[in-house]
Image (cartoon, helix red, strand yellow):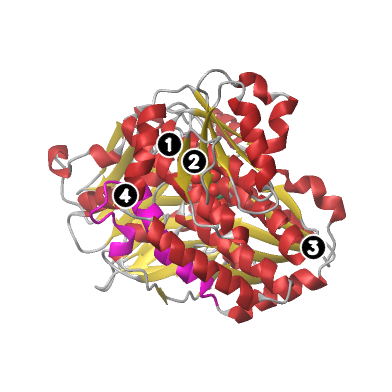
Amino acid sequence: MCGIFTYYGHKNTAPELVIEGLKKLEYRGYDSWGIAYKTNDEIEIRKEIGKIGDIKVKDLDLKHSNIAIGHSRWATHGGVNKKNAHPHFTEEKDIALVHNGIFENYVEIKKYLEKKGHTFKSDTDTEVIAHLIEEHAKTHEFEDAVKLATQEIEGRYAIVVLNSSNETMIAARKGSPLILGVGHTEGEYFIASDIPAFLKYTNKVIYLDDNQMTVIKDGEAKFYDMEKHEEIEKRIVEIDWDEESAEMGDFAHFMIKEITEQKETLARAINQDPKIIEKVAKAIESAKGTYFVGCGTAGKVGMVGEYLFAKIAKKHTNFAFGSEFSNYKDFLTKDTLMICISQSGETADTLEAIEVAKEKGVKIVSIVNVETSTMARMSDIVVPIKAGPEKAVASTKATTSQLAILTLLAYACDGGVKKGQQELINAAGQINDMLNPRYEEHIMKIAEKIKEVESMYIIGRGANYPMALEAAIKLQEVSYIHAEGFAGGELKHGPIALITENTPVIALVANDDSKKEIISNATEIKARGGYIIGVAPENDDIFDFWIRVPDTQAVSPIVNIIPVQILAYQLAVLRKNDPDKPRNLAKSVTVK
Ligand code: F6R
């Protein structure tokens, strides 16, 4: 949530570089953007409302500078306007700051600073940090002033501060991501919320951990532990992502590129090191209580986990959304196992759930895409899903890879990791055949037909019930059509009142013991005028429109969600929405 990109080095095009970097981070927030850069004797600030992706650098008339910070915003405190856009700066305009996260005690600190004579131009918590640093800098060295300010801030944050008078850039984090890219020429550094933003320049990275700070000054970066008040050594890690995998290539949008990539990403998830899967399976076997935890789509994947374990491993597990997990804290012991599911590994609600669990000595497993994320680093065992960078806000390829890992785990707990692998390999092969232009054209027919509807519903049973909930998220977030998912059997207890003539209802059908019942639920809806779109291995008379999926039994949650991802994408395009950057949303939700 919110993208940070900064440059410090020899190139005198730092402002342009920062704008280009921010464009790659736009999926993290896109209601406004801004940059601050040092010219001869002062800091220049440029802020705009709207998406930075639409900006042409040459139209901006930027001056030369070799040190710049930038931010693309997802508003939390204060509305979307220029004054609330970052960077924020002090009266003297010698300190500018960008911030990702939420500063919870800013009201008290703002009052204290106002009494000291500070005046504020924005409604943000961020501007308060800039002034707090300025206040401390009256009596302390700049670095110490930043340290003192961060110690007074409560909440999760990543900040980068630029001081023009001594040409220093300082970055600090607690709970929100911040990564340092080490340039190929000496004394060149990038700082970003996510690696793909600077992959074009370097694949050498240093991860800042919580309560750590880097001070870049005189062409050198030094690192400090802000709690222990000491300098620390940090390791450079070489990332093997290539720039191309983080770019759109010939596709019109990242979302469709990532949907199409599922042929390969699933294969990568399945070809896991079996030792990791078996290690997690053992941990599940010996745990007294296992909780799947995640948010949004990753949460729905966790719910599928409960069903897969009940059905395949005959094992009771629990599920909780990250934001709800603390309600279960009285049941947690050192024998509990928590399995966190996350694409980014930076979702604040899930990270907080981990903190609650850790206090009780719970063992943490994380199933994550970003292997070096905060979540991964807080975990005892990390299962990387290896989906590669996911840039579209709506999760697609990460979702199916997470589902594949849970399927493997459920089979491993039943003693059959190989059987699980085989089932998944078969399914992946069939998905490969399914994902072709003809399939997309077929789905486009239904997208054209329903593109103007106000509401639609999705039903599923068993593991396809949480997938119906996930299908609704996909449709809501990119098409902006009101969509709701239900357990097939639940409609008749109330929601069926919403069905009128031609209301589209997608039935997610698996060729298992739930098939007869879900078809019967679809029949009940059809009898009330509903228009039934069947996502199923076989056609049925009850379907008004059939989208064929491979017959994959236990793997049906994976194969059934893919056509809905395609439909959601197509509806977004037909309705002239930006599928990669849906309104009000951001990738990586780093606020509570
Ligand atoms: C929806 C979507 C979100 C995320 C959720 C958790 O398409 O992507 O619902 O699933 O914000 O994010 P991660 O997986 O990064 O923890």
Amino acid type shown at disc 4: Arg
Q: Amino acid at mark 1?
A: Val
| Numbered tag placed on residue 438 in the rendering | 4
Residue 174 shows in this picture: no
Left or right: 175, with 393 as reference point: right
Which amino acid does the dot numbered 3 rest on? Lys
- The residue tagged 2 is 474
Neighbour tally class for label 4: few under 14, some 14-19, many 20 plus, Cα within 10 Å: few
Indicate the secondary structure of the residue bearing disc 2: helix
Q: Are marks 1 and 2 in contact (CB under 8 Å)?
A: yes
- The part of the chain drawn in magenta is 244-272
Residue drawn at 65 percent across, 41 percent down: 518
The residue labelled by disc 3 is 315
Is 287 left or right of 577, judged from the image as shown? Answer: right
State the separation of the CA atoms marked 1 and 2.
Answer: 6 Å
Q: Secondary structure at mark 4?
A: helix
Q: Is mark 2 within 8 Å of ligand 1?
A: yes
Q: Which residue is mark 1?
A: 478
